[in-house]
Amino acid sequence: MQAEKHLKWAAVQNDDRIAFQLAGELSRDTLLPLWNEFQKRQQRSSFLSEKQIVDQNITWDLAQVSRIDSAGFALLCDLINYCQKTQQPGKTLYLENVPSQLLTLADLVGLADWLKPYLK
């Protein structure tokens, strides 16, 4: 019997910093709810709305990510790209507690250099 797979996320606001925390598997089997949340980002109800992140320093905390596959990596890259383009100039964006699987995937698809500025 296979263990049930989950992905949970939260946004923790602290003054001019917002930390997006992901927990569980970041894989093709768990991405649909997060993808749907990302797609409604222009609405107030989305934790990724432009209003939420435009003037924030952003951290993506991956400490509780137990597994990441290529689909999870692709979505995370889209999220990073969206946040980076949406932020005001001078604001920071970092990935914390990056799993080795993410670094391996970045290397395999030729995005290791693109990812480096976001690593903390």
Image (cartoon, grey):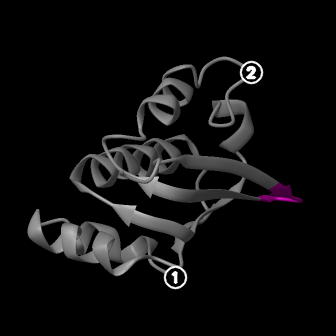
Asked if 72 appears above or below 82 in the picture, the reply is: below
Cα separation between marks 2 and 1: 29 Å
Q: Is residue 11 magenta?
A: no
Residue at the image point whose x is 22% and y is 74% from the top = 113
Q: Residue furthest front?
A: 1
Q: Which mark is residue 120?
A: 1
Which tag, 2 or 1, sits closer to the chain's start? 2
Q: Residue furthest right?
A: 15
Where on the picture, by quarter, is residue 42? Answer: top right
The percent coordinates of residue 25 (x first, y second) are 44, 56
Where on the picture, by quarter, is residue 111? Answer: bottom left
Question: In front: 2, or 16?
Answer: 2
Q: Amino acid at mark 2?
A: Arg
Q: Is residue 15 magenta?
A: yes
Element carrying mark 2: loop
74 horizontally vs 9: left or right? left
29 horizontally vs 18: left or right? left
Q: Amino acid at mark 1?
A: Lys
Where on the picture, by quarter, is residue 64? Answer: bottom right
The percent coordinates of residue 104 (x first, y second) are 21, 76
Which residue in the protein does label 2 denote?
Answer: 44
- Extent of the magenta region: 13-17
Residue at the image point whose x is 36% and y is 51% from the top = 1
Asked if 96 appears above or below 59 in the picture, the reply is: below
| Label 2 Cα neighbours within 10 Å, binned few <14 / some 14-19 / many ≥20 | few
Question: In front: 42, or 40?
Answer: 40
| Label 1 Cα neighbours within 10 Å, binned few <14 / some 14-19 / many ≥20 | few
Residue at the image point whose x is 58% and y is 25% from the top = 41
Residue at the image point whose x is 45% and y is 45% from the top = 79
The percent coordinates of residue 10 (x first, y second) are 71, 49
